[in-house]
Image: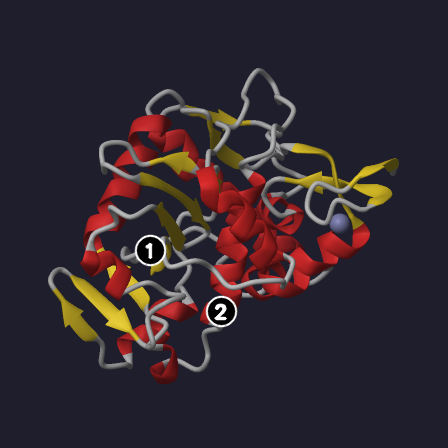
Amino acid sequence: MKRGKCKLCHALADLRDSHYLPKSGYKKMRASDLKNPNPVVLSGGKAKQSSLQVRDYKFCGACEERFNKGGEAWILNKIPQNYGEPFWLHTLLNSKTPTVNGDDLLFSQAGIPEVDIAKLVYFALSIFWRGTRRWSAVEGGQPPKLNLGRQEKAIRAFLLGRGKLPKDVVVTVAVWPYKKVYPMAMMPRADAGTGYRSYWFYFFGFIFLLALGRKIPAQQRRTCSYHSPEKFLTLSLGLGSLVKETISTELLSLDRSKIESMFKEIQAIRSKTSSKE
Ligand SMILES: [Zn+2]
């Protein structure tokens, strides 16, 4: 621990060794018997099969706990661990009747009480907001710094439980639309060319999208997971294909077949060691 000013609550406190993306997400990907025991995380446009655990002394214990209770604990408990294993959320959504919205399917919170959309929204905001801080580079890869502009303060207040999100902060919680879920995480990055600030990240079967500003299309506002009265969860092929293309492009530098075989290797080792865990 290190003494300093907590970046979230601004209190002078003992700072924890904080992670940009939650630590247990990495743990789930780790299998100590692997030739390369490290998870795949994509950062700064580079694919890396390395210990890309972006971390720094940033937050006090109370704020780490806030992040944990706010959303991390929930999502970490619900993500698939192995490549190709059925995703419980897909099974659940298959049994529900969605609202069709163009190419997207929308599920209201009331229709899927098994999913805690408020926690997913909080989790998303906590990760996007963490992206506004400067994190130390790991193996030459530094996550891109996010610029939330004038909304940064409001988002910080929201994370502290001191305020609501302004209407020009639109959050989309989406489900990976393809059967095989990549058990991996991607750092938030900008979605260029939208005409307003927009960022997204992928986390073990979930896609989170953040849009900021007055120019956000009405349609996107209408389906916001926070502001819409229905608190929608979205299943979007368009968003899915954007993420899939990005993963494919970035994995080219690594060789896609290697990634797939690594996922399979992790799975094989996990099934052997699961009785000990
Ligand atoms: Zn704090």
Looking at the picture, tell me which residue is in the foreground, 42 or 162: 162
For badge 2, the amino acid type reads Ala
Image quadrant in which the N terminus is located = top right
Q: Between tags 2 and 1, which lies in front?
A: 2
Identify which residue is drawn at 46% across, 79% down: 114
Crowdedness of circle 2 by 10 Å Cα count: few (<14), some, many (20+)? some
Left or right: 53, with 168 as reference point? right
**As drawn, is 22 to the left or to the right of 220?**
right
> Where is mark 1, residue-wise?
176
The residue at which mark 2 appears reads as 118
Establish whether ligand 1 lies closer than 8 Å to the Cβ of label 1.
no
2 or 1: tag closer to the N-terminus: 2
- Closer to the camera, 191 or 22? 191
- SS at circle 2: helix
Seen as rendered, the residue at the extreme top is 140
Q: Which percent across, then down, holds residue 259?
A: 42, 34
Specify whether residue 210 is in view. yes
Number of other residues with Cα within 10 Å of mark 1, as a class: few under 14, some 14 to 19, many 20 or more: many
Q: Is residue 107 above or below residue 253?
A: below
Q: Looking at the rendering, in which quadrant would you find the C terminus?
A: bottom right
**Cα separation between marks 2 and 1:** 18 Å
The quadrant in which residue 244 appears is top left
Observer-nearest of 101 and 215: 215
Looking at the picture, how far across and down is residue 30, in whole percent? 62, 43
> Can residue 268 be seen at all in this image of the molecule?
no
